[in-house]
Image (cartoon, rainbow, N blue to C red):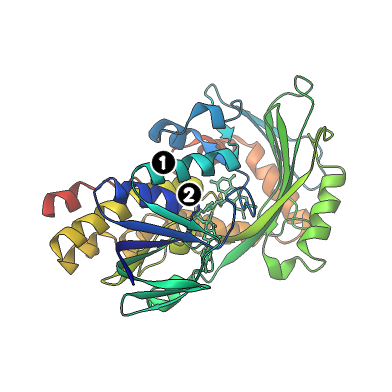
Amino acid sequence: MQTVDVLVVGAGLAGLHTARLLAQQDLTVSVVDRRRSLSSGIRTTGIFVRRTLDDFDLPDRFLGPAIRDVLLYPPSRQFPIRLSSDRDEYRVADMPGLYQHAHHAARSAGAQIRLGVRYDNASHGVVRFAGASPVKARFIIGADGAYSRVARDLNLDVNRRFLVGAEIVHPIATGTTTPAFHCVVDPRIAPGYLGWVIDDGLHAHVGIAGYPHAMRTGIRHLLDRFAADAPGRAAPTGPVERRGGPIPVGGVLRRLANPAGLLVGDAAGAVSPLTAGGLDPCLRLSELAATVTAAYLRSGDPSILRHYDGQALRARFRGRLLLRRLFAGVRSPAAAEAAVTLLRGRTGRALATRILFGDGSFPDIGPEPVLARA
Ligand SMILES: Cc1cc2nc3c(=O)[nH]c(=O)nc-3n(C[C@H](O)[C@H](O)[C@H](O)COP(=O)(O)OP(=O)(O)OC[C@H]3O[C@@H](n4cnc5c(N)ncnc54)[C@H](O)[C@@H]3O)c2cc1C
């Protein structure tokens, strides 16, 4: 049986980033993903915020033009609030390209990556797959998304609160639109979240997300209804792709690690409960996960795992969890109109600016205390 130091389940951004960092530390790392190709089954719009672009080395060639303007619409779609930043706030990534790049980077660092391999279960360090030989692993990393099986098998916490999101993506005629992020607050189509059109001048992403129990006619039907006259949408000039998936919004889980393994990315609930952004959190948490894992495997000291503490991270999400509850409470078009009216005032605009252009999507979690111990 093959033996590795670390088995990573999931080759999303969290899994690939963690695998690369661990392989760079001379650990033997194997990654499996049930997807046969990283260009298929994409579950993200791929909007990266300024803070991520500043802090992580994402290749420019996979990032679309910068966006500085956000328009917030009430259900009536009348008189949107325009918020403009003097900085480049968002860039939408070519996600197939970015996944390929992360795959290549992890492989170049020495990680073995096997696609088309489905994780089945793990016990006593033996990891089993559907249709592939088992592997013995000193440590297992669950980067297997919002409905993590690894979390269950390792007896770690699991996500319980979800939004579900879906979008269509297509190329548009260049030079015909002004790049902008259009957000529609309308509980009839996106209960508990937003409908969005993001146009960076090259592609349009038209999507909705909301609480699944409140989307009685189904998300596909609601998305098609929204897309039919979504504000700011330009006509497709090429193939229309569909994406979608669950978004955990209950905040970072409390129990994220034990001597058998740990969780990263959506599996760890590392998504901003308010904005539902998970790309920055998955990169940031992966850095801490890799530092803690390497220090633990080098020393064999399980107390090092205490540095990977969901409870401590969670405490820094109180405000966002509260705002998520308020957002979830906007259930009628009239309440949504009133909420957008509140945002038109000075305090409301300041709050919206802070949420949309601020630096607080996920706490900074430096690895220094872990390194000091190891
Ligand atoms: C519609 C939508 C739009 C979004 N847009 C944005 C956005 O614009 N910006 C932003 O910041 N966040 C966005 N998010 C959230 C963000 O995309 C996620 O938080 C982030 O991609 C999580 O990365 P991950 O690596 O943890 O999980 P994933 O990318 O979900 O990767 C998990 C991987 O595990 C694999 N896997 C699962 N089970 C198994 C198994 N049993 N065996 C083997 N492999 C398995 C899957 O195939 C998958 O490749 C969006 C989410 C959705 C649903």
Residue receiving disc 2: 13
Q: Earlier in the sequence, mark 2 or mark 1?
A: 2
At label 2, the amino acid type is: Leu
Can residue 362 be seen from the camera position used here?
no
Q: Is residue 261 visible?
A: yes
| Mark 1 lies on residue | 105
Residue 321 horizontal/vertical position (percent): 49, 59
Residues 59 and 276: in front is 59
State ligand 1's quadrant: bottom right
In the rendered view, does 195 fall on the left or right side of 247?
Answer: right
Position of 165 compared to 110: left or right? right
Q: Mark 1: which secondary structure?
A: helix
In depth, the one of 153 and 54 nearer the eye is: 153
Q: Residues within 10 Å of mark 2 (few under 14, many from 20)?
A: many
Residue at image coords 30%, 51%? 22
Q: Is mark 2 within 8 Å of ligand 1?
A: yes
Q: Which mark's residue is nearer the viewer, 2 or 1? A: 1
- State the CA–CA distance, disc 2 to disc 1: 12 Å
Give the side of residue 347 with respect to residue 252, left or right: right
Which corner quadrant of the image does residue 306 belong to? bottom left
Mark linked to residue 49 = none
Quarter of the image containing the N terminus? Answer: bottom left
